[in-house]
Amino acid sequence: MGGNPTGDLLAHGIGGAKDLPIPLELAIAGAVAALVVSFTVLAVAWRSPRYDAATSGRPAPAWLDRLTSSTPWRVVLRAVGFAFFLYVAAAAVFGQDTLVNPFLGVFYVLLWVGLVPASVLLGPVWKALSPSRTINAVLARVSGTDPEVGMYAYPERLGYWPAAVGLYAFVWLELVYPHSTEIGPVRLWCAVYLGVMLIGGALFGNRFFERADPFEVYSSLVAKLSVWGHRDGRLVLRSPLANLDTVPVAPGLVGVVAVLFGSTAYDSFKEASPWVRFVQTTSIPSGLIDNVALLVFCVGVGVIFAAGAMATGVGPGTRRSTLPDLFAHSIVPIIVGYIIAHYLTYLVEYGQTTLVQLSDPFSRGDDYLGTADLAVNYWLSFHPDFLARLKVGAVVVGHVLGVIAAHDRAVRILPRRHQLTGQLSLLVAMVFFTVGGLYLLFAA
């Protein structure tokens, strides 16, 4: 990543083959071997389910549980989140329509990419900071109603599908829309998002945010790889895989993970030389090509995964059509691995640039936060060997954790005679994702 903020913002993931001195063939061979060996070891040593949401985890220190469950703590978090929201909103409304406006960096970098490490380390941070939840809670208090309960019960058949649509709207804005770095369209997107969230919260209460808020669903899914969880209303410490097993299963979960994974893969794909040459030489409008490609990547990931999950025998009490959502949690570590591999440099380096820009939200030479004179550290870009190993390692570890999560779920819900053979098709799908993902990572 260079020192030009404009180039940084437009380049997104930054870094493909030029940052990766590891041979592609070696990386793919090692990754596939890791998956196959992991599956073989699991088949021999992991014959019964080990994760149970009702018993897993140990209680967190009592003082920490009291603190995080207290009303003052929650109010402070909401106040901090809302104050930051107002600060960034002021930059969006009154700031200049240029790439140095921190609104763009907050939206595309700190929010979208920064949610991943924040949620892995701290838990579902967007749920605690969400301005939509804060406004909904204030309106409910003023009207004397309960923010948990809206006017109607949330239709369970909708599940996570509204969140999947919202996530797709975000990645479309970021990766396809030709004016994605102009303040006006991004500001309009945020206004529509906030309006939909407030209407949904009023109608269906906080259940709407849990299922339909794209950023909350995204953050809460990734937070399942943290060590923080809850059981019987108490804060507990769990292993990340045990926590991952507690992902609530509902319709549309495959749609959510397909959009997250497919859009990240597409972001790599659109930087690959063969695709760039095709777009530049074809007579088909580039806007149409980009729209179709993004849709194909997201739908393709969902179809491949669903086919792999459903290609097995089931017991008399299980419908085959429910299997993709039951196994969708196993894609979460893969998503996190690819986001680290694809966006790490972007987050670290342009995230620092955004921190600098936040001190001057109106581009007048102000220094409200005292960060205007900070120098951006480009250490990652200057150490390609380290970066290469970190990227490939993140992809491989994500897939191995996905195989483990899928195996534990399989030995719980599949008939004994299908517990191993039934996973082979899912393993093939994950191998396909590994090979394809690494190829795109190197080809970008």
Image (spheres, grey):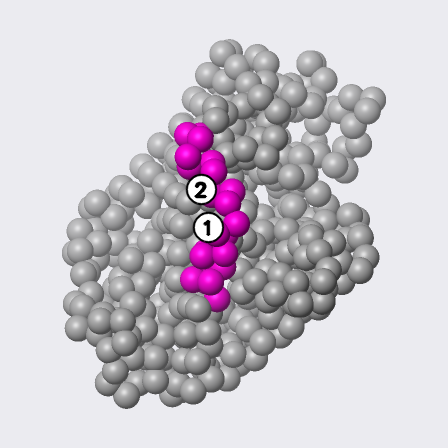
- Give the image location of residue 426, x and y in percent: 60, 32
- Which label number is shown at residue 67? 2
Q: Secondary structure at mark 1?
A: helix
- Residues at marks 2 and 1 touching, judged by CB atoms closer than 8 Å: yes
Residue 384 position (above or below residue 358): above
Among the 4 quarters of the image, the one containing residue 351: bottom left
Asked whether residue 334 appears in the rendered view, the answer is no
When asked about the image quadrant of residue 306, the answer is top right
Placement of the N terminus among the 4 image quadrants: bottom left
Q: Which residue is mark 1?
A: 73
Camera-side residue of 319 and 143: 143
Our reading of the magenta stretch's main secondary structure is helix
Q: Residue at x 46, y 50 (%)?
A: 73
| Residue range corresponding to the magenta coloring | 60-82
Between 62 and 55, the one nearer to me in the picture: 62
- Give the residue type that dot 2 points to: Leu
Expressed as whole percent of the image width and height from the top left, the position of residue 157 reads: 79, 49
* Left or right: 325, with 278 as reference point: right
Residue 374, relative to residue 123: is it above or below?
A: below
